[in-house]
Structures are given as structure tokens and as C-alpha cells.
Image (spheres, rainbow, N blue to C red):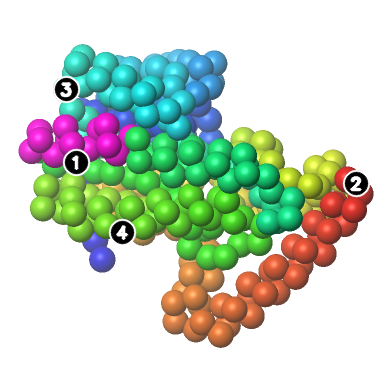
């Protein structure tokens, strides 16, 4: 089911987290190409500056580019106050920033759970708290984009902390798609599958040797089926234009989600098989890493 959409981003003030690379940078560049006025953040100040420079080199407009850690409510609130003070409420908010840590309940430490939840769930909460009320008060509509994950839809092996955050963001989006409709603010929940971003290189897999042959095979397989950041960005912007609630970037994820909803026994068999395969593959890497 569709909701309010934005036919054009031309002249719209678009606030975007995770802009230093990957999906965030690709989305920023494409939004700027459509005439958006960008307000960008990332905790990677150097990468953020590179994105802002790239956008400006393409003829785009960057009205703000400030480094911040979205897991800090104080930093997000200060950034929102600065942005609103300089130019008023934004028209589009895109929560794209994220980290990922994989592991089993035997290998994960408390800090792994907390770090992922603080960035991937509380980060978007801080942004929503700080930017959505002024958008509502402005009375001119708008759009909220929350980038969840395939791990926010289905039970991927070793993804418990990541799924805790991404399922949570999915739940927030499910509520806000109805709460915000009366304010003509659309909500798009993006659930990418494999995407070839820097996150693929930086993801921490606890208790395994990342340089083992098993892990190299896993990464090669991931990249082989991964979509490009540009393709993911195009799907996001198309979802905003059409007012689509759920956006996939992978046919495989769409299929598994369909099995989960309409053929639960087949979904259970598929996920058991995936878990067994991951256990064998990662088990080899774990043994080598000890």
C-alpha cells in the first residue's frame, strides 16, 4: 500500500545520515542531481567532506555538512538546532547510517549488542525526535526514510544484534506510516539485501578469523550477489517519489519475505538450511581463528 509521496525533490531540504559512503553517499549524489538541497552528516568527517565535495562538483547544493555521531542524542539535537536555526524545518529525513556486528550468543560480548543498538536503532530515534516535530509543525508535508535491512525482515544467521536494531526500526516505521499520514508525511522502510558498501569490509564477525579461506569465500559470495550502492539509492528515491512503504533492493530477500508471509513451512526450511550452511562455513573460520 502506498502513502504520501514527493513527486520532486527539487528545492526540497533533505537531511541524510551516513553520507560519507555507501548507500548514503550514492543517495546524496542522486538526490542532489534531482535538485535537492542537502544537509549531510556522518561520524566520518573526512568521508563526509569528500561526499560534499563530490556533490558540489556535480553542480549540487550542500547547505550543511557536519560530522556527528547519531548514537549521541546531544550531538543530534545540537545539529538539528543549527540546521533549523539557519534554514528552518527539513522536508525529507533519511536515516541511512549504520554499523553491523555478527556473532553467536556464545561469542558476542555485551558491548557488541549495545553498540549496534545505539547506532542502528537509537540513532534513528534521535533523528526522528529532533527533526520530525518541526516538519509536522511546518505543515507542508514531507517524507521519512528509514533504512532497515533484510535482517529486519527475516532471521539471518549470526545477525541477532543487527536484527534487534533493524526489527526495532521496522516497528517504528510501521507505527509512523499511520501516525504521520494525517500530516501528509510519507514513510518509506528500506530493507536492502546484499549491497557492496564499505560496511561489507568493516563488519565485525566475532570469534572468527576474517582472513581465513572460509571467510574469503563468504565475502566473495556476498559481493557476487550484492547490488551497487547506486542501485540501492535509486530504489530509495523511487520509493519516496511513489510513496511506497516497503522497498526491497534484492529479489532474494523479496522471495524469502514472501515465503515467511505466505508459506511459513517453506520459510522455516529455507532458514534452517541457511543457518546450517553458515554454521559449517563460519565454523571452519572460527576453528582457524582460535
Q: Position of residue 172 (x, y in %)?
A: 33, 53
Q: Residue at x 51, y 17 (%)?
A: 45
**Around disc 1, counting alpha carbons within 10 Å, would you say few (fewer than 14), some (14 to 19), or many (20 or more)?**
many
User: Dot 3: what SS?
Assistant: loop
Name the residue at the left extreme.
139
Percent coordinates x, y for residue 180 in the rendering: 18, 50
Give the foreground label among 1 and 2: 2
Question: What residue sits right under mark 4 in the picture?
Answer: 174
- Residue 162 picture location, percent across and down: 56, 50
Instruction: State the count of labels.
Output: 4
Q: In this view, does 143 lie to the left or right of 183?
A: right
Secondary structure, magenta segment, majority class = helix
Q: In this view, does 18 lie above or below 155?
A: above
Left or right: residue 234 versus residue 226 is left
Marking on residue 65: none
When the figure is inspected, residue 184 is found, relative to residue 85, above or below; the finding is below
- Which stretch appears magenta? 127-139
Say what secondary structure mark 2 lies in: loop
Give the spatial CA distance, label 3 vs label 1.
Answer: 13 Å
Q: In this view, does 284 lie to the left or right of 92?
A: right
User: Is residue 4 something one can see in this rendering?
Assistant: no
Q: Does label 1 or label 2 sit earlier along the sequence?
A: 1
How many other residues sit within 10 Å of disc 2, few (<14), some (14-19) or many (≥20)?
few
- Name the residue tied to disc 2: 290
Location of residue 88 (image quadrant): top left
Give the residue number, with chain letter if any, for mark 1: 142
Label 3, on which residue? 88
Q: Which residue is drawn at 26% across and 16% down?
A: 82
Q: Is the Cβ of the residue at disc 4 closer than 8 Å to that at disc 2? A: no
Residue 31 drawn in magenta: no
Q: Cβ–Cβ below 8 Å for labels 3 and 2? A: no
Amino acid at each position: 500500500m502506498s502513502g504520501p509521496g514527493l513527486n520532486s525533490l527539487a528545492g526540497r531540504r533533505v537531511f541524510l545520515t551516513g553520507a560519507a559512503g555507501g548507500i548514503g553517499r550514492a543517495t546524496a549524489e542522486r538526490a542532489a542531481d534531482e535538485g535537492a538541497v542537502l544537509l549531510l552528516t556522518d561520524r566520518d568527517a573526512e568521508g563526509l567532506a569528500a561526499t560534499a565535495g563530490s556533490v558540489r562538483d556535480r553542480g549540487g547544493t550542500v547547505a550543511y555538512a557536519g560530522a556527528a555521531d547519531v548514537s549521541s542524542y546531544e550531538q543530534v539535537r545540537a545539529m538539528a538546532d543549527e540546521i533549523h536555526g539557519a534554514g528552518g524545518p527539513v522536508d525529507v529525513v533519511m536515516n541511512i547510517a549504520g554499523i553491523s556486528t555478527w556473532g553467536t550468543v556464545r561469542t558476542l560480548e555485551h558491548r557488541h549488542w549495545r553498540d549496534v543498538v545505539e547506532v542502528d536503532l537509537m540513532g534513528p530515534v534521535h533523528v526522528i525526535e529532533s527533526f520530525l516535530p518541526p516538519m509536522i509543525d511546518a505543515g507542508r508535508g514531507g517524507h521519512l526514510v528509514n533504512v532497515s535491512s533484510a535482517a529486519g525482515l527475516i532471521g539471518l544467521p549470526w545477525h541477532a544484534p543487527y536484527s534487534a536494531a533493524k526489527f526495532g526500526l521496522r516497528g517504528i516505521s510501521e507505527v509512523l506510516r499511520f501516525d504521520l499520514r494525517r500530516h501528509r508525511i510519507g514513510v518509506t522502510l528500506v530493507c536492502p539485501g546484499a549491497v557492496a558498501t564499505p560496511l561489507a569490509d568493516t563488519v565485525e564477525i566475532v570469534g572468527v578469523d576474517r582472513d581465513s579461506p572460509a571467510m574469503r569465500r563468504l565475502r566473495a559470495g556476498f559481493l557476487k550477489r550484492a547490488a551497487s550502492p547506486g542501485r540501492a539509492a535509486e530504489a530509495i528515491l523511487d520509493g519516496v517519489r511513489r510513496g511506497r512503504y516497503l522497498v526491497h533492493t534484492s529479489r532474494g530477500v523479496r522471495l524469502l519475505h514472501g515465503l515467511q508471509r505466505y508459506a511459513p513451512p517453506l520459510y522455516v526450511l529455507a532458514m534452517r538450511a541457511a543457518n546450517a550452511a553458515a554454521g559449517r562455513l563460519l565454523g571452519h573460520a572460527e576453528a582457524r581463528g582460535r
